Structures are given as structure tokens and as C-alpha cells.
Amino acid sequence: MTAMIMHSPTPAMTPRDASGVWRNSLAAGLAVALHVGVLAALMMGWSTQKPVVDAPRVMHTQLVMLPAAPAPEPLVATSAPPEPEPVPVPAKPRVDPQVQVQKLEKAALARKRVEEKKAEQQQERLATEQRNRELEQQRLDQQRLAAEKARAAIPAPAFDSRQYQPLSKAAPDYPERALDKNIEGDCTLEYSVNIQGRVENPKVLDGCHPLFIRPSLAAANTFRYQPRVVDGKPVAVPAVRNTFHYRIK
């Protein structure tokens, strides 16, 4: 067996610089120390959350009113006050008795004039009331005279020299149907009597049985009256009423 030794053309490695090794060692040591510190913090319960900030404390104040202190008593001077000066009293004016009498006389005269004026006003008022009463009485007398003259001017009603009188009044026929049914009753008519004494416009009033209407109208048309005469002239008489009594005997 043949052994061959080959030589590499690459030059041999030279030892590193001592300063570079020291720096690398220092960096590696710091990294290891940092990792060890983080691991220790995690194991001791260190958290990444932010710490809770305590709420700020508040101080409460209260206002208390104290009673006012009593006022100090005023100082009293020991010296005596000055005496007041005497006030001069004015002297009363001297009144002349004659002047006083004249004033009293003038006052009495003025009072008398006032009383006289009141009496005059009272008399004038009484005279005015008396005059008003007289005027009112005169007015009433004039009204009474005027009323009497007016009544005297009204003509007197015409004197009825002769009243209308019935000359013939025939009784109506009793209806056979009313006799058969034994019907009785009354029937009142109203009509006018003309100047010839005849009946005009006869009409039946309420309360007449229907069976008695026709015979009552027929009988009224046959009535004859003596005409009413007023001042020598015949006149018509309105609203004359006549009642027929239907009775079965």
C-alpha cells in the first residue's frame, strides 16, 4: 500500500487577535445575563400590564358659622355733661281790649250774615217747591178738562127704536134614522138677519150630531124676523144664534 501525502496550497491559519476575542466574550456574557434576568422576572410573577393608578383623594370641607361676639359696652365718660343754655321765652304781645272787641263784633256779624243767607235759601227752596206743586196741579186740571171735552165730543150711540123680533120659527123635522136609533141631542146654529128680516149664511157650531145638521139648516132658512130699525132705518143684525133641541117624547 502506497501512502500519499498531499499538501494543500492554502496557507495555515494565524491565531486571532486577543482584543476581538475579548469583545465577543463580553457580548456573549451580556446576552446570557439578559436572558437570565428576563427568565427570573417571569418566574417571580412580573407582568407586562401597566400598573393600576390609584384614584386621587378628595378632601371635603364644611363651612361652620360661629355666633357673633357680643358688642362691647360703650365707654362711659366720667366727666359731667355741660349744662344746657337757658332758652329765652318770647314775651307775649300786649292785646288791646278795643281791638279784641272789634274782632268779636266782626265774627258775630259774619255769623249772622251766614244764618240770614241760609234762611233766604230755605225760603227760596220752599217757594220753588210750592210753585212746582201749583204747576203740576194746573197740568192735571188741564188734562182732566181735555179728557172731559174729548168724552163730550164722542157722539152718543144710536138709539134702537125697535129691536128685531122673530115672526115665524118652524121646528125642524126629527130625522127618522135618529128616531130608529133613539138618538137625542142639541144643535146650535149662528146666522145673520138682514134688513128684510131673512136668515143669511147659517152655519152649525161644534157639538151638533151629524144626523141633526141638515134638518137644523133647513129650518133656520125658513125663519122670518122683524128687522131692527135704528134712527128710522133698518139694519142687519150679525151673529144671531139659535139652538134646536131634539128630544123623543
Image (spheres, rainbow, N blue to C red):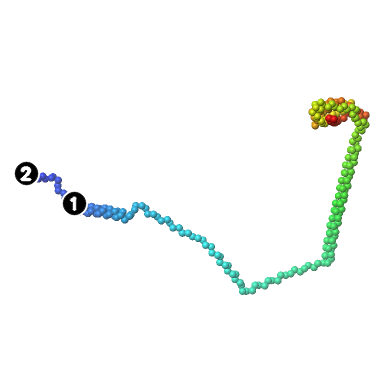
Q: Name which residue type carries label 1.
A: Arg
x, y percentage for residue 95? 81, 67
Neighbour class for label 1 at 10 Å: few (<14), some, many (≥20)? few
- Quick check: 56 above or below 155? below
Coordinates of residue 20 in the picture (x, y in percent): 21, 52
Question: Residue 44 or 6: which is nearer the viewer?
Answer: 44
Front in this rendered view, residue 203 or 179:
179
Q: How many marks?
A: 2
- Horizontal arrangement in the rendering, residue 248 relative to residue 43 (left or right): right
Q: Which mark is residue 1?
A: 2
Task: Specify the quadrant that holds the C terminus.
Answer: top right
Residue that mark 1 sits on: 16
At 21% from the left and 53% from the top, the residue drawn is 21
Residue at point 59% right, 69% down?
73
* Vertical placement of residue 137 versus 183, above or below: below
| Drawn side of residue 178 relative to residue 19, left or right | right
